[in-house]
Amino acid sequence: MNIQNKKIFIWRRISVIILLILLIPFSNACTVFQYQLRPPIVKPHKVETLQVTAYCACGECCGWEYNRFNKPVYSYGPRKGKRKIVGKTVSGIMAHAGTIAADTKLYPMGTIMYIKGYGYGTVEDRGSAIQGKHIDIFFKSHEQAMEWGNQTMEVTIWLPR
Ligand SMILES: [Zn+2]
């Protein structure tokens, strides 16, 4: 091996090492991300049979309608006629795939649940019709929510500390 070839060989090695060092933060980010999505298996959990219904952000699912100024307002209940921010949950964040509405006396905000066929979700919302052992899971479209329908099934629950 002449000196020129040896230099190229060394530089290749150095570039591979640099590449590996650059990849470390990304691999860490992946672990953190997965940790947020899946609760640690060691954390105590319970399995309960719950009625699982589905909702989306639409007026039919969330009890709002357009007023005569074409603005969304609550269509019934104590806030009837008051302005409604479409898709905003009781916890303040916007509903997304994984948002669960529950009776927060039984399952407080931040409770993590695993629902077979839906995946992991977090209690971030409430609903006047969601009482006791009944949860409502959020879907992006009304069609998906209707497709889910009304199922009674075993749900794995991790209560917040
Ligand atoms: Zn809907």
Image (cartoon, rainbow, N blue to C red):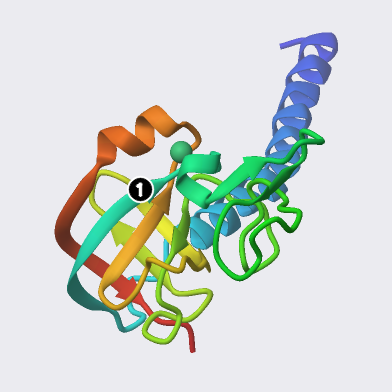
| Residue under the image location 32 percent in, 46 percent down | 118
> Which part of the image, by quadrant, shows the N terminus?
top right
x and y percentages locating residue 154 in the rendered image: 16, 64
Which quarter of the figure has residue 142? top left
Q: Mark 1 points at which residue?
A: 54
x and y percentages locating residue 24 in the rendered image: 68, 48
Which quarter of the figure has residue 32? bottom right
Q: In this view, does 26 lie above or below 107?
A: above
x and y percentages locating residue 84 in the rendered image: 71, 53
Question: Toward the viewer: 103 or 48?
Answer: 103
| Residue under the image location 21 percent in, 62 percent down | 51
Q: Which amino acid does label 1 sit on?
A: Ala
| Residue under the image location 47 percent in, 41 percent down | 60
Q: Is residue 9 above or below residue 54?
A: above
Q: Is residue 21 left or right of residue 58?
A: right
Q: Is residue 143 left or right of residue 14?
A: left
Q: In this view, does 44 lie above or below 80?
A: below
